Image (cartoon, grey):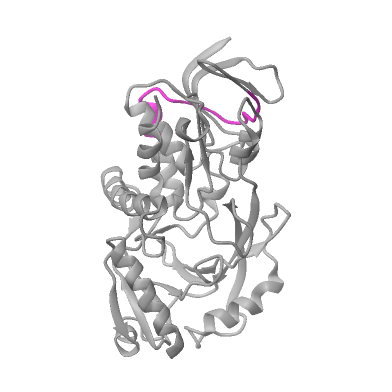
Amino acid sequence: MDTVDVVVVGAGVVGLAIAREIALAGREVLILEAGARIGAGVSARNSGVIHAGIHYPPGSLKARLCAQGRDLLYEYCERRGVGHRRCGKLIVATSEPEIGALERIASIARQNGVEVTALTGDEARILEPQLRCAAALLSPLTGIIDAQALMFALLAEAQSHDAILACNSHVTRVVLEKDGVVIGVNGGEPGLRARQLINSAGLGAPALARLMEGLPEHHVPRTYFCKGSYFSLNSRPPFQRLIYPVPTAGGLGIHLTLDLAGRARFGPDVEATAEFDYAVDARRAPLFYAAIREYWPALADEALSPDYAGMRPRITAAGEALADFRIDDARVHGLPSVLNLFGIESPGLTASLAIAREAVSRLS
């Protein structure tokens, strides 16, 4: 039977960051990825935003790890040459009644130690002349990143410290033993022994946890698929910063994001679904036009095209308060050989390096 010190399941940005952290500590690590390549799931289907840490409940893992991860990520991108830009964002109130919501957001941001500046509508329009708003918050720490380049950099650094990646390796059985785990891959008999297993499988994390023979069922949350679609702008955008409306139930609203080439896309919306489907329904376009024209009334007809969709790894149902990140270690389930990561949605990309440090600090 093959043996390894640590197995990380999932080669998205968080799994790769964890594997890198373990490898840099001089430990043997094997990354098992069910897909044919790294980062093809949640990590490839998001807004590509480096979040400042504004919206998350003070004292939560999301708030703490987002702020820490933001600083670590900017430093890492500079050092490793990963494409990024600290462009800033505006959170906008498009009507007088929404100004109170901006004030509440600013209060939360300040409790989280995040810099924001309150602007009048006229001050916001000096920065972005085509913007319509009654007031805004400026977040100078928000940025954008080439998420794929980040993942390649993390993998390269991990592999330079002897980490091994095995793609097309779908974990189908996990037997928990007193001093480790035994893992079966692709339907075969368990043939890989590890001292510790880190479940960073994203959307598949709860399903993987349910395979763990010896992990009580009540420690595994239910999965709720929440789809977010994006539409791209067919022309160059007139904005230099990201534009976010006041958050809506279940998400941050249909916002404008930019990529490093200057192209713009809008999204994601929030669509609870029982289907795992990445297709973008063009019939959702009227919802996008209406939402965008609240803050950009000059958006022309036929200016948007369906782009891509992502799935959020939600562990709470639609209408319920969003869950915090869960990093379940032995203090939770009593099993020192297993670390389960659940509900690692936004700001998971921003927080990835901080999540990795937190996760590795909990290993025995």
Which of the two residues, 299 or 357, is positioned nearer the viewer here?
357
Residue 5 rendering spot, x and y as whole percentages: 45, 18
Instruction: Specify start and end residues of the magenta stretch as a single range.
Output: 156-174
- Is 163 colored magenta in this rendering? yes
Residue 151 rendering spot, x and y as whole percentages: 44, 42
Label count reads 0
Picture residue at 71% right of the left edge, 73% below the top: 283
Quadrant for the N terminus in the image = top right
Picture residue at 39% right of the left edge, 22% below the top: 162
Residue 186 located left or right of residue 129: right
Residue 307 rendering spot, x and y as whole percentages: 60, 64
Quadrant for the C terminus in the image = top left
Residue 241 visible to an observer of this rendering: no
Residue found farthest to the top: 1
Which of the two residues, 261 or 69, is positioned nearer the viewer here?
69
Q: Quadrant of residue 112?
A: bottom left
Picture residue at 42% right of the left edge, 35% below the top: 18
- Is 354 colored magenta in this rendering? no
Q: Work out whether 262 lies above or below 224.
A: below
Q: Work out whether 201 lies above or below 78.
A: above
Residue 19 visible to an observer of this rendering: yes
Residue 198 rendering spot, x and y as whole percentages: 50, 31
